[in-house]
């Protein structure tokens, strides 16, 4: 058995970490904010805080708040279209597992609209790299 692992990931962890987002090197100039179609990201303040931090950083953003529990392909495709149509060059997913997982899939589809669903994360079958993604987990299940 053999494999290679490369994960260039920066993790900010701890109370108040979201308040340091504006100090980070962001992976693009315009973000698609991916959140659930419920109200938790708005109610817990993480959406407003993220928007505030992006504004401080001079980063534009577009809100995509249509993620449901166990998101379906059509919603992911809609999110990818929203990213492309609005010129978003990276994804920020905020919330629990559904939003974070959908954000990853949206990042793949946005950059590879003609790719088959099973091929989005296959380096040999995908045409383009996925859009960069930042994840802001707000539940302990996704930590």
Image (cartoon, rainbow, N blue to C red):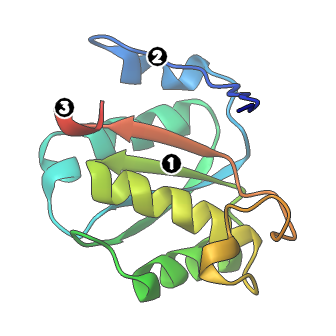
Q: Quadrant of residue 68?
A: bottom left
| Disc on the earlier residue, 2 or 3 | 2
| Disc 2 from disc 3: Cα separation | 15 Å
| Disc on the earlier residue, 3 or 1 | 1
Image spot of residue 53 (x, y percent): 47, 32
Residue 29 vs 80, above or below: the answer is above
Could you classify mark 1 by the number of other residues whose Cα lies within 10 Å: few (under 14), some (14-19), or many (20 or more)? many
Residue 91 vs 4, above or below: the answer is below
Could you classify mark 2 by the number of other residues whose Cα lies within 10 Å: few (under 14), some (14-19), or many (20 or more)? few
Tag 3, which secondary structure? helix
| Disc 2 from disc 1: Cα separation | 14 Å
Q: Residue at x 31, y 14 (%)?
A: 16
Nearest to viewer (mark 2 / mark 3): 3
Instruction: Name the residue that disc number 1 marks.
Output: 92
Quarter of the image with the N terminus in it? top right
The label number, if any, that marks residue 140 in the structure image:
3
Q: Residue at x 62, y 61 (%)?
A: 107
Q: Is residue 99 left or right of residue 84?
A: left
Of residue 88 and residue 135, the one placed in the foreground of this image is 135
Instruction: Name the residue that disc number 2 marks.
Output: 12
| Disc 3 from disc 1: Cα separation | 18 Å
Image spot of residue 84 (x, y percent): 69, 75
Tag 1, which secondary structure? strand
Disc 2 to disc 1: CB gap under 8 Å: no
Q: Is residue 6 left or right of residue 95?
A: right
């Amino acid at each position: 058995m053999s494999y290679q692992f490369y994960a260039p990931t920066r993790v900010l962890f701890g109370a108040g970490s979201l308040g340091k987002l504006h100090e980070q090197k962001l992976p693009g100039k315009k973000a698609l904010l991916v959140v659930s179609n419920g109200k938790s990201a708005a109610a817990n303040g993480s959406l407003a805080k993220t928007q505030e931090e992006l504004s401080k950083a001079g980063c534009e953003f577009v809100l995509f708040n249509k993620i449901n529990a166990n998101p379906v392909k059509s919603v992911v495709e809609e999110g990818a279209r929203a990213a492309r149509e609005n010129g978003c060059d990276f994804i920020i997913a905020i919330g629990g597992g559904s939003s974070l997982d959908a954000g990853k899939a949206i990042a793949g589809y946005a950059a590879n609209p003609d790719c088959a669903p099973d091929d989005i994360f296959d380096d040999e079958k995908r045409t383009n790299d996925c859009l960069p993604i930042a994840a802001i987990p707000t539940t302990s299940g996704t930590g």
